[in-house]
Amino acid sequence: MSTETITQEHRTAGITTAAPWRVRTVAVLANYCLSVTCNDGTAGTVDMSQLISSEQAGIFAALKDEQLFDQVRIELGALTWPNGADLDPVWMHEEIGKNKTWCVPR
């Protein structure tokens, strides 16, 4: 199942929608992976499988539930889930820019 979310413009004072690291689109892939595209066109895959299965997963452990994982959304340019989990978009942008794939560490 592939779902895709496209960010909406945020017009809140002080928020710049053009920041290159902001996530513009996200699609859920198999095996706890996401396909993302940022404002500057940087695109790649985020592999969360190692983090989610780690004993130190913390808040991310709940994302083993694929129905919850599939509820990823974009808030202010960052990937978030209903349980409060989120990923640092600047770090993700840097890693995808270098490698096209980011295996989120445990």
Image (tube, rainbow, N blue to C red):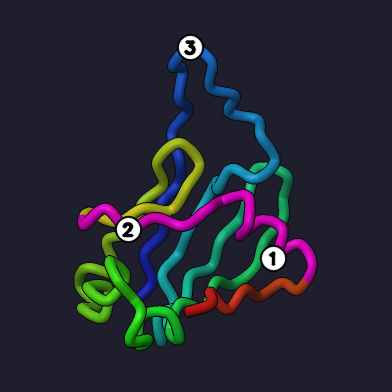
Q: Amino acid at mark 1?
A: Ile
Q: State which region is magenta.
A: 83-98
Please tell me how crowded label 3 is: few (under 14), some (14-19), or many (20+) other residues with Cα within 10 Å. few
Indicate left or right for 58 with 89 as reference: left
Location of mark 3 (residue): 13
Q: Which residue is found at the position 54% from the left and 68% from the top?
A: 35
Indicate left or right for 83 with 53 as reference: left
Q: Which residue is found at the position 47% from the left and 47% from the top?
A: 78
Eyeballing the image, is 87 above or below 15? Answer: below
The quarter in which the N terminus is drawn is: bottom left
**Residue 65 at x, y = what percent?**
20, 78
Indicate left or right for 46 with 90 as reference: left
Location of mark 2 (residue): 85
Q: Amino acid at mark 2?
A: Ala
Q: Amino acid at mark 3?
A: Ala
**Does the residue at mark 3 contact the one at mark 2 (Cβ under 8 Å)?**
no
Location of mark 1 (residue): 96
Q: Which mark is residue 47?
A: none
Query: Sequence-wise, which precedes: disc 3 or disc 1?
Result: 3
Please tell me how crowded label 2 is: few (under 14), some (14-19), or many (20+) other residues with Cα within 10 Å. some
User: Which residue appears farthest toward the right when viewing the image?
Assistant: 98
Distance of label 3 from label 1 (alpha carbons): 29 Å
Q: Which residue is found at the position 48% from the left and 28% from the top?
A: 9
**Residue 96 at x, y = what percent?**
69, 65
Please tell me how crowded label 1 is: few (under 14), some (14-19), or many (20+) other residues with Cα within 10 Å. many
Q: Which residue is found at the position 36% from the left and 53% from the top?
A: 80
